[in-house]
Amino acid sequence: MPFDLRNQYDKIYRYCYLRVHSRETAEDLTQETFLRFLEKPQYHNKNKDLQYLYTIAGNLCIDEYRRKTTEELPEDLPDDTDNENKVLTSIALSGALKKLPDEDREIILLRYVNEEPVGVISKLYNISRFALNRRIKNILEFLRKEFEKEDLK
Amino acid sequence: MNKKSKKTLKNAFNIPEPNQKDSFFNKLDIKPERKFSSFIPVYLPTAIVAVMVIGVWGGIKNLPRFEQPENTDNNIIYSSESSVSENQTDYSVQTSLSSVRNSENQNRTTTAVQNDNGNTVTDEKNMSVTTTSAKTTNKNSDKNKDESSADSPSENSSENTSDSTSEASHTTNTSRNTTNVKTTGTTTLSTRDENNIKPTKPLTSTQTTTTEHKGFSPLPQTTTTTFEDSVDFPSCTAPVVDVPPDYTIKPPVRYYPDNNAVDINDVIQNDPNPPSTDGQPGDSTTATWEDFLDNSDMILIATVDDVIYTAIDGVPYTQENISVSEVIKGDIEQYSKISVYSNGGYIPASEYKIQLDWAIENNFMLFDPAQNKTVSQVGDEYLYFIKKSHFPLPDGSYSLTTYSDMSKFRYKDGHYINMNNSNIILDFDDLTNN
């Protein structure tokens, strides 16, 4: 698998943003993720690079969340009005996504936005590919019901 | 999901584009792609080289030590007779190793000459095992051939006395095999010098004799040493590699498919006494999900490694050696290898349970499909419903839950389709919900 860090940057950034809901914080965490990844040779495994990157990013997001909760509530949560103004065609889908549990939303992002392989995601969440497929199918079914106008076959 | 849907989904997340990406990568000292890509090719060969070095070093360290005699003679003649026997090829070799040193040729070590025709011995096995000292340079071989090949060791000693200060004869009888070497030999060192006397240490082994003569140090002493030595080569430990457990079994007999094989159904139609199939399990028309789930010890997704046609008591069976890629039900390690038996397969007419004279006379190969609709091929991946085999199938093997290939499903378009009845389609939810 050719591994381009620039391409992975966008994916890790989206993953962080979904968790912290802040562009600046997400970028900081993304850069910190790459710095830690590059500093540690033991992270570099041909078959587990993506998994390591997501694991580092996830841990950083958790640390950030803990730190934020002790300081203040985030002020830059995504504004529903802005989102609707920006992407009118995906209002219903955005609403449907917000109804999903956080982890399900992450799985959908990883699978269909970041287009990560099932094997990577299953290892990231420590579930079998079989269970992951079933879970994705259930999530998509839920989204279909919530947003029938969109074609999510 | 098509591209349009993915794009819509991506927009629905409302994630703004990062604006520090370029500046971040520009700040990095090393280009990320290059730095990252260099890790993989560097680490792997480095690790391999390190393991090899450690292995070689360990092997050398564990070799039996040999104390080199201090008699760094000016002229030394080694005469060696070796009898070498190996595991597969027995042969005997008689060699005469001679070395002449003088002040002009101090850097030369040993010249090995074969007794019969005077050819230089360059056998690496001999050099590495029987006489490590036989690191040969042949620059002076012509000179020494005349001296050593024509004369006995004792004669060599006397001849070289005239123009050298010391001499030695070394006779070795060696028998060995590849792993354990037992060396029995007699070593006679004959040295003489009129000017200087140095004590010589007895040779304790012929395995690691290394002679390198750089100085003129005559030894006017005669020493005779007889030794018997047994040397065990140290075993090298290979790096531990995780190997998936292999539970496959050896089939009782193996038959190979024949394109001219006669379908057993055609034969039975012509046979006056066709075999009865009443009461055999696995009637495909009555099998239900409960049958599959209740009767299955294991539910696996596995890849076919080998397809073996065999027979037990005149009944053909097909043994599939499979590698488990995913375990849905059952107690077995992922990636392990097992053998799964199914009914039917190829069998020679002479071995078949029903004696068909015409088929036997023509030496036909019979093919019994046994209600199977398909034949597995190496590399196929299936969803298996299997159970532990019972007599007469071999212990440790597994067999399909049903009589036929109804217990096998092939993945296609997100569903598992039955190999015996394509109308039976299994979805992920079907399995987990049950």
Image: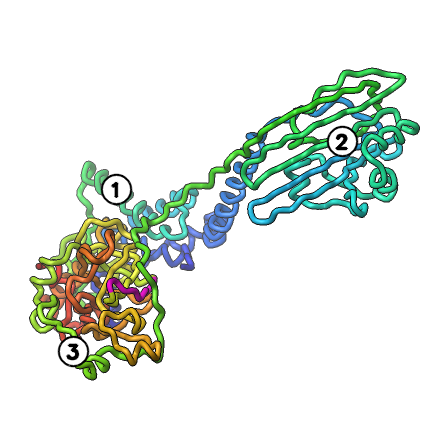
Q: Any magenta on residue B312?
A: yes
Whole-number angstrom distance, CA of label 2 to CA of label 3:
87 Å
Residue interval drawn in magenta: B306-313
Residue type marked 1: Glu
Which residue is under mark 3? B273
Q: Is residue A124 left or right of residue B259?
A: left
Residue B52 lies, in percent from the top left, at 53, 41
Question: Which SS does the magenta portion mostly show?
Answer: strand
Which residue is the extreme one toward the bottom? B270
Q: Residue at x 61, y 27 (%)?
A: B229
Q: Which of B248 and B215 is in front in this view?
A: B248
Which residue is under mark 2? B212
Whole-number angstrom distance, CA of label 1 to CA of label 3:
80 Å
Quadrant in the picture for residue B169:
top right
Residues flagged by tags 2 and 3 on a common chain: yes
Residue type marked 3: Asn
Q: Circle 1 sits in a helix, a strand or a loop, which is it?
A: helix
Q: Residue at x 26, y 70 (%)?
A: B352
Disc with the residue nearer the chain's start (2 vs 3):
2
Q: Point out which mark residue A64 bears.
A: 1
Eye-nearest disc, 1 or 3: 3
Q: Residue at x 18, y 67 (%)?
A: A90
Q: Which residue is drawn at 14% across and 76% down?
A: B423
Quarter of the picture holding the N terminus of chain A: bottom left
